[in-house]
Amino acid sequence: LTFDDGPSHITKDILKTLEEQSVKATFFVLGCTLTEEGEECLKLMVEQGHEIGIHTYSHNYKKIYASVESFLEDFYLVYNQVYEVTGIKPRIFRFPWGSENSYNRKIKKELVAEMERRGFTFYDWNVSADDSLGHPTENKILKNIMKDIDKHKKPIILMHDASVNKVTARSLEKVIKSIR
């Protein structure tokens, strides 16, 4: 399970469910959401043994994909925040909108090479909850995941823990139980 776009006020609910279900996840965090509560969530993620990855500071495609340098500048803002709060130096990241998107097309090859040169690895997903599109229901999120999960030997499930994803938090226990 992976979660993008947090932390937010629903992240603690997600962390509680993950702990109750004894499941570890990866959180690709945004720097622009790191309030005092968000910093508490980062510390809790580390305490509970979850992985923290970088999802950029701003999530602003015009800014981050303007050039390799722009991406790196934005990336290191949140990287440094995570390090200052947790003492952890994340080695993984996820491109906003995935590695194959229309925004990064001109710089993708150079950007991936530079990030790998710096010791970072990116992770996309192969199963999507589609929980950030429209107005998903708990059943729709579960259906989206379950229709694709058996198609992959190692499914990487994309979910979101942004403040607008309350339904994701409510559906998580059912998702975990269904996957099991």
Image: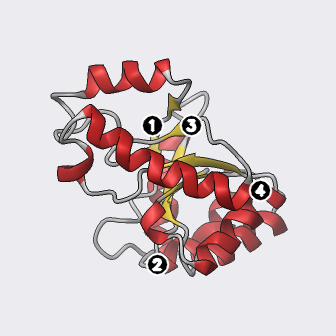
Mark 3 and mark 1 lie on one chain; the one further toward the N terminus is 3
Tag 3 residue: 92
**Label 1: element kind:** loop
Amino acid type of the residue that numbered disc 1 sits on in the rendered structure: Asp
Q: Of tags 3 and 1, which is closer to the observer?
A: 3
31 horizontally vs 153: left or right: left
Can you see residue 72? yes
Amino acid type of the residue that numbered disc 2 sits on in the rendered structure: Ser
Tag 2 residue: 163
Amino acid type of the residue that numbered disc 4 sits on in the rendered structure: Val
Mark 4 and mark 1 lie on one chain; the one further toward the N terminus is 4
Tag 4 residue: 46
**Other residues around mark 1 within 10 Å, as few (<14) / some (14–19) / many (≥20):** some
Question: How is the protein colored in the picture?
Answer: secondary structure
Is the C-beta separation of discs 3 and 4 under 8 Å?
no
Front in this rendered view, residue 69 or 18: 69
Is the C-beta separation of discs 2 and 1 under 8 Å?
no
Q: CA distance from mark 3 to mark 4?
A: 15 Å
**Label 4: element kind:** helix
Tag 1 residue: 124
